Structure formats: structure tokens, C-alpha cells
């Protein structure tokens, strides 16, 4: 089996520090959490931005501030910037984080319900964002909330917008979308092309069981407060505690942990793209 790539979804758009005091919100808090999670064994970081009132924002200066702080604290980690819709629906605003040339960006290739909203990614928007990924050479992580999103990604690959090998993240257990069961994880992991890589992001109580399943199946794992605020015993989680738990489970069953450099190889990232973002953020 490949070494295990551990992704941390640090902040997201929904949680607040009232819901969990360990949530990193400011650039400084996010960078400090990245360094702690890296020390614990994480290699890839899924990054959102918040404004001064903790509200989600697509303001590009907020993304730049987060990237600058992370690059200062943990220059070797892989950054994946979010293109999610809760912070704004305007197409170009959602594409801006990709135009900063991070090594990776998130890309949800379809629509589904989430608590309180339709998570809308229309066919024209998906094609627009796929073109941005093609133009920039940034590697998308295909966020799969429903089975059809795999087919949509393969269609974009067939049209030449996305280059294989694709990397999928199965987001399971979000209220309104595909339930967080091992059966669903197995089905999705068998529905992607040979050579593609995958991770699982279990939402809420599904996080740890699905992570354990993915570790045993040869997939990769995403954890973090964006997806789940609690440890299995009900106490407040923190990003480093979640990573430590994953590392323990993996070691117990003999799966080794990937360093950031090893994760780049597993995910087939272009080594020449490692620090393109530095010139974009004025670092
Ligand atoms: Zn996210």
C-alpha cells in the first residue's frame, strides 16, 4: 500500500470558535495549527478564509494572508485552497483562490443539498472552473458528495480540461448528501478509474469510522474541524488531536504515514508547481 496521505480541513465555512474553541480562524491561528498538524503527520492542508467577524469570505487578500502565514510556519506542506460556495456565489470570486497557483484546489463537480442550502455547482459553472484548472495547471481535488460527481469529473477529463491521474475526495455523511457508510465508501472507491487516488472526508460522527476504513482499504484520509468538531468520546476535537488519532490507527495496522514530499509523489503533483504561489502572494 502507498503511504497514507493525511489532509486536514482546518477551518471550513460553518464552524465558529463558539462551537469549538480550538477552531483556527485568523491567519496566525491557522498557521500555528498547520505546524502542529504537520508535526503530528499531516501533509496536505485544505484552507478557507474568514473575515474579522469569523464570517466566510472569498476576499483574495484574506486567502493571501493565510497562505503567507502558513508558508512562513510550515513551508514544506501542500496547500489546497477552497473554491466552496458558502462564502459567495460569484463565479470569478470562487475561481480566484485557484488563480493564486496553489499546488491544489478543491473542485465539487455537481450540486447537492447541505444544511440550509443547495450547494450549487451548475454544469456551466463546473466547465468554467475546469477551464481555470486547465489554464493554471493547479491540481483539483474532486470533492464527491454524490456518485454522479465522479461521472461529471470523468466527462471533464474526456473533454481535456482535467488531466489524469485524478484525485477524488469522497465527502460522506453531510446532511442532505450521500450517507457516511463503509458500503458507500467501497462503492465510490470502486467507481473511479485505475490510477486515480482517493481520500475520504467523513462528516461528523462518520469521520473516524470512515477514516479507519480508508486506511485499511489503501485510500487516504481527510480530517479536521471543518468536517467534525468532536472526538468519538464527545469532547471537543482539535485539528492536531484528530491527526494524532489517525496516525495511531494507521501505525497500529502497519500503514506508514507520507511526508509532504512523499504525498506529492502519491498525488502526482508537478514538483515545479511547489512554490509558484510565493510570487502570487508577494512573499
Ligand atoms: Zn472546505
Image (tube, rainbow, N blue to C red):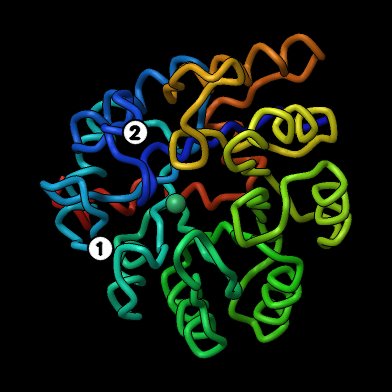
Query: What residue sits right under mark 2 in the picture?
Result: 19
Residue 30 x/y as whole percent: 28, 33
Residue 27 x %, y %? 20, 37
| Foreground disc of the pair 1, 2 | 2
Q: In what element is the residue under mark 2? A: loop
According to the picture, the residue beneath numbered tag 1 turns out to be 58
Instruction: Identify the residue shown where x is 83% and y is 30%.
Output: 1
Q: Quadrant of the C terminus?
A: top left
Q: Nearer the viewer, residue 59 or 162?
A: 59
Could you tell me which residue is drawn at 59 percent across and 43 percent down?
Answer: 203
Residue at x 65% of width, y 61% of height:
177
Which residue appears at 62% of the width and 26% of the height?
Answer: 258
Task: State whether residue 151 is above or below residue 21.
Answer: below
Q: CA distance from mark 1 to mark 2?
A: 22 Å
Q: Residues within 10 Å of mark 1 (few under 14, many from 20)?
A: many
Q: Quadrant of residue 145 in the image?
A: bottom right
Mark 2, ligand 1, within 8 Å: the answer is no
Q: Nearer the viewer, residue 4 or 137?
A: 4
Question: Residue 155 location in percent, x, y?
Answer: 71, 81
Mark sitting on residue 256: none
Q: In front here: 2 or 192?
A: 192
Q: Helix, strand or loop at disc 1?
A: loop
Figure check: 82 above or below 16: below
Q: Nearer the N terminus, badge 1 or badge 2?
A: 2
- Picture quarter containing residue 90? bottom left
Q: Position of residue 69 (x, y in %)?
A: 21, 35
> How many marks on residues?
2
Amino acid at each position: 500500500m502507498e503511504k497514507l496521505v493525511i489532509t486536514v480541513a482546518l477551518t471550513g465555512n460553518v464552524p465558529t470558535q463558539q462551537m469549538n474553541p480550538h477552531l483556527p480562524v485568523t491567519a496566525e491561528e491557522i498557521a500555528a495549527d498547520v505546524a502542529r498538524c504537520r508535526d503530528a503527520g499531516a501533509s496536505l492542508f485544505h484552507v478557507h478564509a474568514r473575515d474579522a467577524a469569523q464570517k466566510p469570505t472569498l476576499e483574495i487578500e484574506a486567502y493571501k494572508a493565510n497562505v503567507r502565514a502558513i508558508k512562513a510556519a510550515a513551508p514544506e506542506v501542500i496547500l489546497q485552497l477552497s473554491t466552496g460556495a458558502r462564502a459567495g456565489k460569484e463565479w470569478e470570486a470562487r475561481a480566484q483562490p485557484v488563480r493564486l497557483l496553489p499546488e491544489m484546489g478543491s473542485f465539487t463537480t455537481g450540486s447537492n443539498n447541505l444544511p440550509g442550502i443547495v450547494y450549487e455547482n451548475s454544469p456551466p459553472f463546473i466547465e468554467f472552473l475546469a477551464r481555470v484548472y486547465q489554464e493554471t495547471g493547479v491540481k483539483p481535488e474532486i470533492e464527491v458528495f454524490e456518485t454522479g460527481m465522479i461521472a461529471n469529473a470523468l466527462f471533464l477529463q474526456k473533454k481535456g480540461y482535467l488531466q489524469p491521474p485524478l484525485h477524488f475526495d469522497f465527502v460522506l455523511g453531510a446532511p442532505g448528501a450521500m450517507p457516511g457508510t463503509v458500503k458507500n465508501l467501497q462503492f465510490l472507491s470502486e467507481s473511479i478509474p485505475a490510477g486515480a487516488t482517493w481520500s475520504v472526508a467523513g462528516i461528523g460522527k462518520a469521520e473516524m469510522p470512515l477514516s479507519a476504513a480508508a486506511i485499511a482499504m489503501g485510500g487516504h484520509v481527510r480530517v479536521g474541524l471543518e468536517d467534525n468538531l468532536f472526538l468519538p468520546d464527545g469532547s471537543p476535537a482539535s485539528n492536531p488531536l484528530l491527526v494524532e488519532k489517525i496516525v495511531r490507527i494507521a501505525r497500529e495496522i502497519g500503514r506508514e504515514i507520507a511526508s509532504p514530499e512523499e504525498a506529492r509523489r502519491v498525488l502526482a503533483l508537478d514538483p515545479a508547481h511547489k512554490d509558484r504561489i510565493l510570487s502570487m502572494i508577494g512573499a
